[in-house]
Image: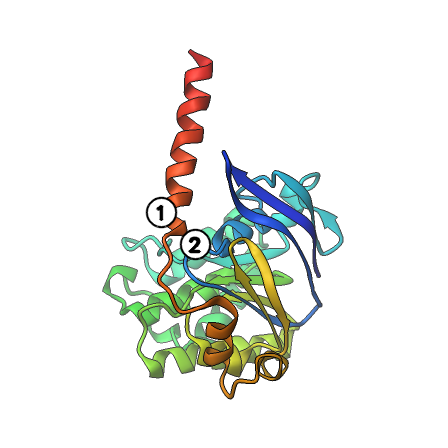
Amino acid sequence: MIRVENLVRQFGDFCAVDRISFEVGAGEIFAFLGPNGAGKTTTIKMLTTLLRPTAGAIEIDGLDVAKHPHEVRRRFGIVFQDPSLDGDMTAQENMELHGVFYHVPRKVRAERTERLLRLFELWERRNDLVKMFSGGMKRRLEIARGLLHTPKILFLDEPTLGLDPQTRNQLWTHVKHLNQTEGVTVFLTTHYMDEAERVAQRIAIMDHGKIVALGSPQELKQQTGKESLEEAFLALTGSTIRDEAADAGRDQLKTMARMWGNRR
């Protein structure tokens, strides 16, 4: 469902993603982990057509992302780290607007909206303004909205950040149910190792722009001789706090400044 070959993304002299390759099978739940600044978000932006690769190739459902970006976008749903709902609209209006953008027929839109809002336990609140929702309710609505157009892949970029354990558990229960009943491929990032170990069938660990390990949670633990995924993660990436994200941001600003100077 996802195929990545020798993917590279540079910002000036800084290489955020350094020749990574991996595949994600249809119907798989695949976790993409790494410390801050490792290159995860940059990779997701390239997979979802928001950022052009410097080099390498990406295929989504057999389509070249660089050549067919519009067709590719119809094949996935995405939930970003930052909220993207309209708080001054109701839950149902947010779903309706998304369905219109993706040209979902009205009857199908109505049926699927009800099914998803019921699944994510939001149907009774469908006519309430989203700005009145809790953080967990907003996250559930974002995932429901991302699934409205029946995508083959769902990208989840740290979807449970800041949520309490009960809400996190409930959210993953719903996602796993959809994965099993509709065959949706799930590509997720998270900093909660217990989530990745419980939910994902395979995990890629990224560090300094490279994939340093790839396998099932059990395989990664065996590879490092550790008892938990968190211990395996630390063994592979170290325990020091990183500042690559800040470095990448400075390099991006320098690159933009050079480009602007060249235009003058």
In this view of the protein, can residue 48 be seen by the observer? yes
Residue 156 vs 181, above or below: the answer is above
Q: Residue furthest right?
A: 62
Q: Which residue is mark 2?
A: 37
Instruction: Name which residue lies at 44% across and 62% down.
Output: 35
Q: Which percent across, then down, holds residue 234? A: 46, 73
Instruction: Name which residue lies at 33% across and 59% down.
Output: 90
Residue 133 located left or right of residue 121: left
Residue 65 located left or right of residue 138: right
Three-letter code for the amino acid on which mark 2 is drawn:
Gly
Q: Which percent across, then down, holds residue 241? A: 35, 62
Three-letter code for the amino acid on which mark 1 is drawn:
Ala
Mark found first going from the N terminus, 1 or 2: 2
Q: Which residue is mark 1?
A: 246
Are the residues tagged 1 and 2 within 8 Å (C-beta)? yes
Looking at this view, is 74 or 109 the one in front? 74
Using the numbered discs, state the Cα–Cα distance from disc 1 to disc 2 in whole angstroms. Answer: 8 Å
Instruction: Name which residue lies at 71% across and 68% down.
Output: 25
Q: Which percent across, then down, holds residue 18? A: 60, 49
Q: Residue furthest left?
A: 132
